[in-house]
Image (cartoon, coloured by chain):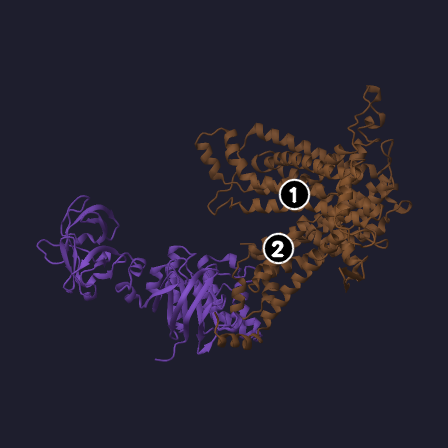
Amino acid sequence: MPPPYLQIQSVTKKFDKTIALDDVSLEVQEGEFIFLLGPSGCGKTTLLRIIAGLEDASQGRILQAGQDVTRLPPSKRNFGIVFQSYALFPNLTVFQNIAYGLENRKEPKEKIKTRVNELLELVGLPEYGGRFPAQLSGGQQQRVALARALAISPGLLLLDEPLSALDARVRASLRIEIARLQKQLGITTVMVSHDQEEALTMADRVVVMEQGRVVQVGTPEEIYFQPATPFVADFVGLMNFIPGVAAAGGQNQVQVGDDALFIEQPIAQWAGQPVTLAIRPERVQVAQNGQAGNILRARVHEVEFMGPFYRLHLRIGQNDKMVAYMPPENTHNIEIRAGVELPVHLPPSHLRVYQSAAG
Amino acid sequence: MQSAASLAQKKAVGFEWTEERLKRLLIALVIFWLLLGIVFPLFPLIQRSLQDKNGNFVGAANYERYFSTPALSISLTNSMEVSLSVAGLALVLAFGYAYALTRTRMAWKRYFLLAAMLPLYVPPLAHGIGLVYLFGKKGLITTGFGGAFEALGWQGWDINLYGFNGILLGELLYVFPQAVMILMVAASLADARLYEASESLQASPMRTFLTVTLPSLRYGLVSAAFVTFTLVFTDFGVPKVVGGNYNVLATDIYKQVIGQQNFEMGAAISMLLLIPTVMAFVVDRIVQRRQTAALSARSVPYQPKANPWLDRAAFVYCLSITLLIFTVIATVFLASMVELWPYKLNFSLRHFDFSTVGGGGYGAFWNSIRMSFYTALFGTAITFFSAYLIEKLKTFKPARSFAYFISMIPVALPGMVIGLAYIFFFNPLQWKFGGLVIPNPFSFLYGTMGILVLANIVHFYTVSFMTATTALKQLDREFEAVSESLGVPFYRTFWNVTVPLSLPALLEIAMYYFVNAMVTVSAVVFLYSPRLKLASVAIVNMDDAGDTAAAAAMSVLVILTSVGVRLLYDLATRGISRRAQAWKAR
């Protein structure tokens, strides 16, 4: 494997007494699309700003293309950035905005013109060079901001929640477009987002952060199917948590109330201890008549019809809650309404086990 | 903790950061000028108040003498009395006016707003002169229109102008626009949802007023009270003309310094003048800090509903006050253009020939225009650039906070204090602190246009600075970050983006400096030199010498200039903004 293009080594950031980043390390390969994902206040934006040099790291180093850039001011680094607010210069035309960095490099006028037109073409706004930002829609403004960041051909593209100010429909189409552009240009990209759907659809790898720490790094599939902690599981998609006890003998079995559930994950290390079982709502199945193994007795508490599926709010045992997504054709002709008993099947391959926090 | 290696690297790389160094240098320069213009001159003032005429340290002797001389110390009581009275009255009057402008649907709102702002363009002395012509010994009203109505048995009405009454009236006119402006801003920040909620709960209008309107205005009311108090407490113009034997602190300083050349007592009284204004400033700051945002992003702007009786009452109220303002100013105009007020009312421009009176005549008038122009030009440049460096640069946080703090000080400094402090600071060829003798590299400024302009910039700095800061805060805070990422130096973006976007604020600041420099007396009355006489000071001197009509004529010139520049500005900005701000059009 070639050396990573961007290396973040034990970066810590303190604001007065609060710790915004706590010993964060990360390696990004050239051409990779990395997502920093987490709730607000988790430190993802701070990390991005440190990569850009807009904030100083209290400790640790940043290496870009093998060079230590930790103490370099932003102007001496090699990146383009797009902010949530776009930060387009409102008194300059679209053309002037995109040419802003190029003009400063004293490049010949003709060359600048060619380059800007090329970029306008790239972001799909070839006719918009003469307009002012206020004359564009939010999505168009965001594309101009992207073109401006790309104009100086930076080695690294930083995106700070670029889609969160847009409405849902525009967001979805820009999502695809940015991902396509990123692959087309092969530019190493770090994007900050709190939107897990964005991260799952666009990223090569996702970095999930919580309270200034990295809790998991992995492909979208890894993050979704094998969340490292209950926090990740709950933040990325929906997750049901059911308290149980790991089998004392070390078998792959968890006792939930009177029922024993088999799982694939080895859990011998927690034998006899309280654990938390996790399963995604779409993996919960209605047990067929006579089906045996990994069945839990449940009661329907509330039903919401969502269109493609029913969202069932179930109760297990005394008052443990569980949510299940059930396509109408998978209900096995059981009448779904509040109050009915509904045994559910939890496939062993989709059950994950975490050590209970209290344990 | 940084490792030794990274520190060493920081040093090695640091040498190339020319842009970073430039930023630090500029911030250092800003702090230097703020210290030089605002902080340092205060030290010799304090020092001088603790010395006798020969420069010997005498401790609090000057203050003791002040308080043991009833003729002097009565001024402190008088100043407090008149300032509190005006602040209280102005608050009530301006509240009604601002309420009418923002919360009713009366007619002529636009004109009433303009009328209320008119006194801003009038030197405070001119208000006094107008009052003299109306209510003075030979005033129009005092003499019953020159005896015109004697036949009807009306002998006139003497309100006993000279003294408390005159100061009260004059100062009311002087501070009214300021109070209205503050209260209007506060009143326009109303959230309609609160009123709808109150109405839907069937609260009476009175209850709504007491529970929604007043609480939302309380910070504006506090602010207006402190601002008007400070303005009156430190004003010199009005008491100078209509004060009579009713002495106040500001006129005392003038008498001590100009009349008796007693600089030490002048310094001591200046310190007394400073105490309540600084206190008012500090209390206002503390109160304002407790204010949470009155408007959230989800607030709905309040639209007053038609209410015929209220609207009519508001109209009558505003009309009365407007008439009062107009009457006084119109009287100044009339008096300057008649042969002999109020006996020979035939038209004459003879008072505009200043050659037979003291004060400096048209020379002084042109000097004033030049001074105001320079104040506007350099004041705007230095204020905006300072505000930009303090607000937008990321470097050197403690230094920027410090600079911000100093920038707040001038609002608490009365003009006379600035003027006197500048004499002590800029006049001597060397400063003596204890045994220390330091040559004064700035003494060349003394008696020049430079010191007048500097005094004016400092005198009106804080408001201009806040205007600039507010405008800068509205610009996207990532502009600088984007430029840096594109490798564009900050000064380029400052010039290409920040300045064009802030053009309306820049013009606003220039306007503010020009008008204030044109009408101000207090800061410059100690600083002008015989070769550099000024119009506003000429008004004082002509009035002093009994040439009231000439003083009125000079007032008219000053008012016409201020208003004229304001109109030019409105015309010009319409053109400039349309071109420079084409981006705003959709």
Q: In this view, does B361 lie to the left or right of B373?
A: right
Q: How many labels does the image show?
A: 2
In-front residue for pair B26/B321: B26
Q: Which quadrant of the view contains residue B433?
A: bottom right
Tell me if residue B109 can be seen: yes
In-front residue for pair B200/A180: B200
Residue to which mark 2 is pinned: B405
The chain letter for the residue carrying disc 1 is B
Q: Is mark 2 on a helix, strand or loop?
A: helix
Q: Residue flagged by tag 1: what amino acid is it?
A: Val
In the image, the chain rendered in brown is B
Estimate how packed mark 2 is, as few (under 14), some (14 to 19) or many (20 or more) residues with alpha carbons within 10 Å. Answer: few
In-front residue for pair A294/B200: A294
Q: Residue flagged by tag 2: what amino acid is it?
A: Phe
In the image, the chain rendered in purple is A
Residue to which mark 1 is pinned: B227
